[in-house]
Amino acid sequence: MRAIRITIGLLLIAFTASAQDLASFEKRTTVRKLDNGLTLIVMERHEAPVFSYATVVNAGSAQDLPGNTGLAHMFEHMAFKGTDKIGTTDYNGERAALAKVEQTYAAYDLERRKPVGRDEKKVAELEKAWKDAIAEADKFVVPNEFSKIVDRAGAVGMNASTEDDRTSYYYSMPANRFELWAYLESERFLHPVFREFYKERDVVTEERRMSTESNPVGRMVEQFLATAYSAHPYRQPGVGWPSDLATFSATDAAAFYKKYYVPSNIVIAIVGDVNAAEAMPMLEKYFGRLPKAPAPEPLRTIEPPQKSERMVTLHETAQPLYLEGYHRPAATDPDNATFDVISMLMSSGRTSRLYKSLVRDKKLAVQASGFNGFPGEKYPNLFAFFVVPSAGHTANDVVDAVHAEIDRVKNEDVAADELQSVKTRVRAGLVRELDSNSGLAEELASYQTLYGDWRELFREVERIDKVSAQDIRRVATETFVPTNRTVAVVESSKGGAK
Amino acid sequence: MKSMIAAMLLAATSLFGQVTDYRDVKTPPLRNFNPPVAKRIQLDNGLVIFLMEDHELPLIRGSAEIRGGARDLPAAKAGMMGIYGSAWRTGGTKDKTGDQLDELLESRAARIETGGGDDATSIRLDVLKNDFDFVFPIWLDLLRNPEFRQAKIDLAKTQANTGISRRNDNPQGILIRETQKLGYGNDSPYVRQPEYATIATITRDDLLAFHDQYVHPNNMILGISGDFDSNAMEKKLRDAFGKWAKGPQAPPPPPVGTGMKPGIYFVDKDDVTQANIALVGPGTLRKVPDYYALVVMNEILSGGFSGRLINDMRTKRGLTYSVGGGVGAGWDHPSLTRVQMATKSGTTVESIEALKQNVADLRTKPFTPEELSLAKESILNAFIFTMDSPDKIIGQQMTLEFYGFPLDYYRNFPANIQKVTAEQVAAAAQKYVHPEQLSVLVVGNAKDFDKPLSSLGTVTPIDITIPEPGPAPAPANAKPVATNDEGRALIEKARTFFGGKEKLAAVKAYHAVSSLTVKGPQGGDMAIDIDSTTVYPDREHTVMNMPMGQITLVSTPDASFVVTPVGTQDMRSEQRDNIRRELRLELLPLLMYADEPGRTYTATGSEKIGDIDAKIVEVHADNQTLKLWIDPSTGRILRKSSNVHGPQGPAEAVTDYSDWKTFGGVQFPTRYTQTRNGEPFAHGEVKTIELNPSVDAGMFVKK
């Protein structure tokens, strides 16, 4: 006992001696909320003449409505298509041509989806009119001009991602391109143009085929979420249901943009070789242009409590997979730190519960993990367990072993040294993140968006430090109950092949 | 009005005039930047060390790269690098098991990880600065004295076999793998596809021999960066490595082999809505004099969002989400030329034609000044990102050292790119891009294609069926097993005791009612009433009445399932295998099938059970070994020992039989007690047995 206490004490000393604490980061971080509501965070890091940024919009695929699933993600694609000045030979002409595309599409879509009394000849004519309008509009397009400007300037890692909770845009640039970046990033959200929309819809449909339809995990996860959630939009696939993808219009996407891409809903974090005092006036000039607009109404739907176990089985030629999830509160809940600790206990490293039991000792699985924030964290979400059974084992074979580990967490106090090992790794994990501009930019913007304060990135570690063995048992006992559980399995027609 | 004037004044006097055209944005020169330089040290024994101080965070990261990898192993050992790379770390050292290392390291948030690849193996270290002196000796010990414990080799094999079983589940994985085989040929040292059979042959001796052969200071490059003092670190490393003697040098890279004949190759996969497509052929080497022109050409083809491929295949035609590729230039062996994409099944042939056109256009569609300047500037302006962190710099230096390139190679890189002309890029395209040398590979669902693939030419199908494992190979040092006369005679006697060969052969089915008391999961005893019907050779129906309810287990060749109070589900594979095994290895069928070829009976000795000097017969049947203790004077079987899968995993089950009674002319033991791994497990009593009862076939059907 005494030896353990001394060891823990030494570990704590090792950490407090380091300068990587909140205070030192606060010194080099400047936060400014503009008059229009947009929040800018600049964190200085002068190791090399480069910077990274992340723009996080507090709207994701959970904001999609039925009939328009995939729209948040679709707008993200549109944000690469340029502006009224970039990507066009003549915006005035193009604007008129794009309006014609919308007009012809609306007429065509109305006729083709008539449930009764559809005139096929008329459908064909309207389709042709629409495609002709697209061909006319395409004449004004300078393809990929926006991306080419960014590439030419020396950017790396240019991409974006649409999650349930948020949409993020990011890349890294040489430090002398800072004003160019500010111009481009403000312009793309100030004057987006929905050019090549219907072609891009095809591209997104290919993305859906690649990430969801053509791989067993994608297929399983889509069915799982639609089962675990009855009402809340977390049940929807972010890339969209095929019928919606085949139908929604640029007008729909523009409406989404207008409602959600308001400055009070946007946080931009910049990390790197930037002098905040010099940069801020310039940033205000560019980003202050976004017009102030009312904040969108928060999501209305709350998932009703799940009262009975749910199950979905996929019969495939692929090898078996196992997924189960339990409803838990949103990330802003006071117990969030405890959930994070449970996840680490279950699946971080080779000393984790699931690894030791399923992978190492019973050899039932090659991968077994328990994780939070599935599919998002802003709203009540799921704590999920995912297992890849080893050759010769089916999904059924792993259930008891997973539940045995869950029962242990519910019924036995975690030993002090095991808990401390988790806490040590969480703290070290934060230290290890601090030398990446791009990683930091995304974290700062995300924490600012979710909690209203980037400092939560550091405070979260302190909260985790305070989690007790009792907290873990209480939270586990409340959460991991069969009536709160949804299960998805891939059953292989080839048996657990050996 | 006032605010508007104020705003205009503000705009006029502000330092940053707001720009309305991106071309008007001022770009000051990049500030003078001297990236940190790694210190290179070479010891007398050939070990090369790179050190880089980095005091931003209290961390130290290090890596040893050791020459020798999968390309140096024979095809018969395909997959060995994966086993080696895993078991190196998990197998621990002589005095610390891998599990002990896990606890020691993870409680300090430290990591030591090992890996193996085509041309090198590696062992890495990632620690908080204050833990370096504790972890470094462990890392050193693991580097030089890995134990490769068998249990962890077995674990790695389980994982490798699982990977094999899953390798056809994702079309992208199939594409990557088969592209490599087409490009280099199935026999290439760079194509080592693990199979169950090759994994099974890998032994601990193999791993130790590989380690002995390659882990020498003159084959190794060590790089360490982080929060330390270089001089102090150098001293520590000299102390640790200075006296280590040289060993044999790793061999030079082997020839890559010959790729498959160019053609159209097809893998049928019917559970996808997209075709994955690749064009593949020979590539080149990095050291070629026109390498920089090739870099620019590749950027024009596939750089960022600017390249021809993405602009044509994705943006213009909307055929794909992801497309890319180029002419590969390998560090020490020729790489491959590869272009790949995915498209919906209904545009497969259209996409192949468009993709081929884009490749052919490299030779025929002139590179415009705009394309050239965009490509060069993208590369040059992003160059800072190759050296914006100590980790990247030290990684670069280690790579250059490993492949024998000058350590200042990257200093000249920007100037060499700047010099590239349109003519040079065009010449590189003529030299390295040969459409007729490229094979087309398609993984997809042929029935949904827009046109048959054969419309493009002769199609060669590729069969990706995973070869099943053969029977488990006998362990290398197993004594050859053969029936001996004494063993055969004892089995005959046991069969006679049961009722004799003819009587046993006449048993087609039997029905037994019995009770069983078994150790429950919580340790107490659980009483179960059993009613079971067996139809030889392979059907069984067992009703078990337990305290918690009734369950019925049904096993047939077509299906194995369990009926419970809450529903019917497929039987777990272990349970199913248990039942199927016992259908042939329980006492009655053991003797019924005693004459089957392949079964052997070896008398190995004797042991006293009570007053009887029982003879032990080792039986090999169905890849299982079990033992019988037989009373030599009567042929009565007293005891059986076999391996089973129990609730806690594999176990040795020893069953003692007594109270023999006759049913339908055949003798059966009616009482038995069983231990598992030496602990009491169960005892049971058979109430009645009926031979050849009438059986309702419906009882075996899943409802």
Image (cartoon, coloured by chain):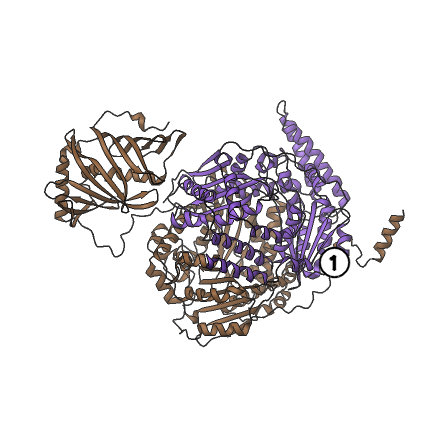
* Position of residue A441 measured from the top left corner of the image (x, y, whole percent): 64, 54
> Residue lying furthest front in this view?
A2
Q: Is residue B485 above or below residue B105?
A: above
Quadrant position of residue B530: top left
Q: Circle 1 sits in a helix, a strand or a loop, which is it?
A: helix
Q: Is residue B13 left or right of residue B503?
A: right
Residue B449 in view here? no
Identified at 53% across, 58% down, the residue is B327
Instruction: Pick out the residue farthest to the right.
Output: B2
Q: Position of residue A456 (x, y in %)?
A: 63, 51
The type of residue carrying mark 1 is Ala
Q: Report which residue position mark 1 lands on.
A: A279
Q: Residue at x 62, y 65 (%)?
A: B417
Count of numbered circles in the view? 1
Residue B71 % position (x, y)? 41, 61
State the residue in front, A60 or B59: B59
The answer to whether B432 is drawn above or below residue B265 in the figure is below
Q: What percent of the width, then of the height, locates residue B79?
A: 39, 55
Residue closest to the eye, B355 or A19: A19
Q: Which chain is brown?
A: B
Q: Residues within 10 Å of mark 1 (few under 14, many from 20)?
A: some
Please give the letter of the chain rendered in purple: A
Residue A31 lies, with reference to residue B351, above or below; the image says below
Q: Is residue B45 visible?
A: yes
On the rendered structure, is B368 left or right of B554? Answer: right
